[in-house]
Amino acid sequence: MKSKIIFTLALFSSLLSLQLAAYPVNHGGAECSATSSYSDELIKSAGRLLNNSTTRWAYVTCPVPKDEFSDWALTAAIESAWVRVMDRTPLRRVSCSLTALAIDEHGGWHSQTRSDATTDPDAGTHIRTLNFSWVRQASYDQIAQYYVTCSIPPRDPSLGASGIVDYRINQ
């Protein structure tokens, strides 16, 4: 009887996690990490990631856990995504890309990327949303990953640091 209850709970838990995976998932900018050679000038504060360097661009990668697994490659995709950024520089822009990367059975790499960047010349404390359309990982569903990469300009001496506020993935 005890094993029947444990099995039922495990099955219910698995079904619940599959159902929850279909909903959009928000991630804080602080989940991103530096891909450039330095990270000591990146500030993680209140869930955000800010570039505190006054001279160097920050290049960061943000994880995108793959919540949807499918036997059919066309159904395993990111339907939409956005990254909210603070662009506090009047002349430089925050840019981000969403990439699906897969390896085929012969070891060949395949990728699909969507990109967006801030365009408003009125820099300041405004939060801008970068939007990404549908992206899938080619037809190599079981050996694929998603990730977001961003380029963050150096801190403006009078306006402050630019950075990533948060991002949302809808699989």
Image (cartoon, grey):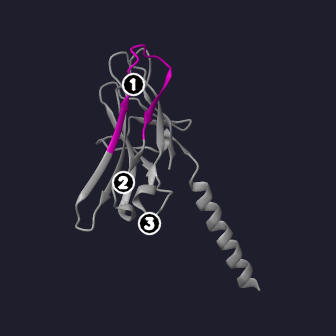
Of the numbered discs 2 and 1, the one sitting upstream in the chain is: 1
Q: Furthest-right residue in view?
A: 1
Q: Residue at x 37, y 35 (%)?
A: 96
Dot 2 alpha-carbon crowd within 10 angstroms: few under 14, some 14 to 19, many 20 or more: many
Q: Which of the two residues, 160 or 88, is positioned nearer the viewer here?
A: 88
Q: Are marks 2 and 3 in contact (CB under 8 Å)?
A: no
Helix, strand or loop at label 1? It is loop
Labelled pair 2, 1 in contact (Cβ < 8 Å): no
| Dot in front, 2 or 3 | 3
Q: Residue furthest bottom?
A: 1
Label 1 vs 3, first from the N-terminus: 3
Q: Disc 1 and disc 3: Cα gap in Å?
A: 37 Å
Residue 4 lies, in percent from the top left, at 72, 82
From the top left corner, tell me how far across and down residue 105 is, in percent: 27, 68
Q: Mark 2 or mark 3: which comes first in sequence?
A: 3
Mark 2 lies on a secondary structure that is loop
Whether residue 122 appears in magenta in the rendering, the answer is: yes
Residue 109, quarter of picture = bottom left
| Tag of residue 118 | 1
List x then y, in percent, for residue 156.
38, 19
What residue is shown with label 3?
71
Q: State the residue position of label 2.
A: 137
Point out the frontmost of discs 2 and 1: 2
Is disc 3 placed on a helix, strand or loop?
Answer: loop
The amino acid beneath tag 3 is: Asp
Stretch of the chain drawn in magenta: 113-133
Q: Does residue 111 appear left or right of residue 19 in this picture? A: left
Foreground label between 1 and 3: 3
Q: Quadrant of the N terminus?
A: bottom right
At x 36%, y 63%, the residue is: 143
Task: Please name the amino acid that badge 2 sits on.
Answer: Gln
Which residue type carries mark 1? Thr
